[in-house]
Image (cartoon, rainbow, N blue to C red):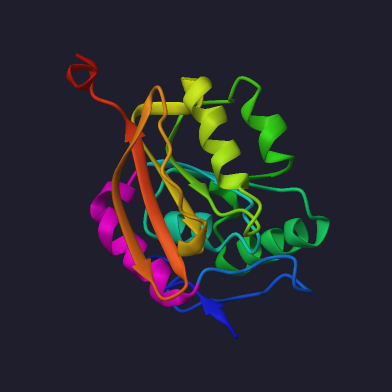
Amino acid sequence: MSIRVIAGSAKGKRLKLVPGDSTRPVMDRVKESLFNIIGRDVIDSTWLDLFAGTGSIGIEALSRGAKHATLTDLNRNALKTIQANLEATKLGQNATVRRADAFQLLKQPPPQPFDYIYVAPPQYKDMWLECLKLLDNNQTWLANQPKIIVQIDPSERQSQQFQNLEEYDSRIYGKTLLWFFSIKDEQDEG
């Protein structure tokens, strides 16, 4: 399996995979669909890529014109891979790479609010749900009209009520679910 940058300034660049099987890189077809949904809104946006793995999502966003991406992972091999992929694509000047536990990170104040937060944790552990609960309770991570995108196996989906977040879209591509959340509109609370 190989992954690449699909569009933008680094189009066609092949990305290294993280050694071992600790990460599950997003398939190019899913990534392409995701960025087709986002469209031109990616331009000048800020991204937080939690459980970044290869860094493929944050790098794709940067290649397509995002202003900045923060890529986090706890795995040292993943961090080395992200750095190598940023160097290969020459997109490192607009990226911050952090070794961090996503749950501890989201309990802290953010360095800035983000337009997009991508949550693609290890499967079948409900880690996505824990991240959404933390974001629901700590909205300082969220910019004015943020989008939170969860990437999980469709079998992991479970209905959930949040105080401040709501689902607005979901798409299934084979064994991948992209699930989109945003902040509830004020008038919805009536």
Residue at the image position 61 percent from the left and 48 percent from the top: 126
Query: Residue 33 magenta-drawn?
Result: yes
Instruction: Point out residue 124 in the picture as x, y percentages from the top left corner.
Output: 63, 58
Q: Is residue 162 left or right of residue 186?
A: right
Residue closest to the far bottom: 1
Q: Which of 172 and 147 is in front in this view?
A: 172
Magenta stretch, main secondary structure, is: helix
Any part of residue 70 in sight: no
Q: Is residue 72 left or right of residue 49?
A: right
Query: Residue 61 magenta-drawn?
Result: no
Residue closest to the far top: 190
Residue at the image position 58 percent from the left and 25 percent from the top: 110
In the rendered image, the quadrant that contains the N terminus is bottom right
Q: Nearer the viewer, residue 12 or 189?
A: 189
Q: How many marks?
A: 0
Residue at the image position 32 percent from the left and 48 percent from the top: 43
Instruction: Point out residue 10 in the picture as x, y percentages from the top left corner.
Output: 46, 69
Tell me where residue 64 sits by quadrant: bottom left
Bounds of the magenta segment: 27-44
Residue at the image position 51 percent from the left and 64 percent from the top: 153
Q: Which of 135 and 19 is in front in this view?
A: 135
Against 134, residue 80 (above or below) is below
Instruction: Point out residue 82 in the picture as x, y percentages from the top left corner.
Output: 67, 60
Instruction: Point out residue 71 in the picture as x, y percentages from the top left corner.
Output: 61, 48
In the rendered image, the quadrant that contains the C terminus is top left
Any part of residue 79 in sight: yes
